[in-house]
Image (tube, grey):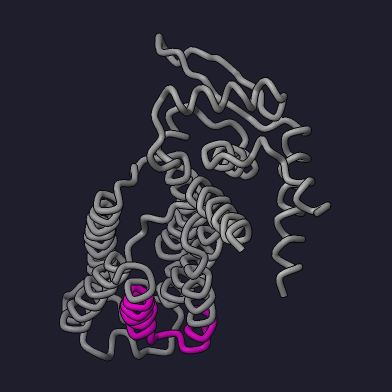
Amino acid sequence: MKEQNEQLEHLAEIRTMMERSSRFLSLSGLSGISAGIIALAGAFAAYQYMGWEAFSSHEVYETNAMRGGRDYTSFLIADALVVIVLALLSGFYFTWRKAKKKGYQIWTPTARRLAINLLIPLATGGIFCLILIFKYHLVGLVAPATLIFYGLTLLNASKYTLDEIRYLGISEIILGLIATFYIGYGLLFWAIGFGVLHIVYGALMFNKYER
Amino acid sequence: MGIISKFNKAFENRIRLGVMSILMVNDWVEFNRFKELIDDVTDGNLASHLKALEKLEYIVVRKAFIGRKPQTSYAATEAGRQAFNDHLDALEAILRKRD
């Protein structure tokens, strides 16, 4: 029996070493929650600025982009940029805190691998959306496109960090596809995808790994 | 017991087991990276276990200079992978027997 316990310990050690060396495990659930809250605040700000009509139009094109002297497109882009920067900063902070608490290094080869595999699909989606806006004025397609690209990004990243991120990725993709049927309600889908889903996922992960 | 005899003595030690596990899923791993990943290991201890695995030809060493700093990296050989897989099979067999 003693022998078998020893073998079980060996297996546990092998598993830990393989995981720790190939995946970035410091990602904190709190990062997800804070990013979600910031996204909801950003969506609320956009709602306050534009009201409901600006995004309940069923047009793909930018028909309501200028109304009462307000430039909705510029506001939305600025709002989205502020949200992304703040969400990333808070995300980094909580992840850094978790790594420090567990005594892990942050900028490891696994972190670099995760960063590269996040950035490639994410940048592709970002550039694609900028082209949609500035070349074709297809503002209505931006919300579905960001959700779908973000979902694919997470799906790709799940190989290099907590495996559960794939479920968040799949949820974002499904939401993005649904959003494609309801052009004009982009802000609502953004609030669900980047706000609510992040908070739910972050809370689940925090509960599972950090309590 | 036949199963026990299949156990590879080279992997009985926790540090060697850790080194091989890491090298099974990574191409080239630096000395300092092992120190980060494996809990409670000193430089000397790690170096001697790496040396032992090298002598068995389970791992190979590559020395390079990054700027002026020497950097030593390690990778598993085909023989090392095979030996480690056999060891895993033996572990699996033992655990299956228990049911």
Instruction: Identify whether B33 is placed above or below A152.
Output: above
Residue stretch rendered in magenta on the structure: A176-204
- Horizontal side of A106 relative to A3 (left or right) equals left
**Residue drawn at x 32%, y 77% as measured from the top left:** A203
Depth check, front residue: B16 or A89: B16
Q: Position of residue A103 (x, y in %)?
A: 29, 47
Residue A117 seen from this side: yes
Q: Position of residue A94 (x, y in %)?
A: 24, 59
- Horizontal side of B11 relative to A143 (left or right) equals right
Q: Quadrant of the N terminus of chain A?
A: bottom right
**Residue drawn at x 24%, y 69% as measured from the top left:** A34
**Residue drawn at x 16%, y 75% as measured from the top left:** A69
Q: Is residue A56 magenta?
A: no
The secondary structure making up most of the magenta span is helix
* Furthest-top residue in this view: B68
Depth check, front residue: A208 or A43: A208
Depth check, front residue: A203 or B20: B20
Q: Position of residue A48 (x, y in %)?
A: 16, 83
Residue A63 seen from this side: no
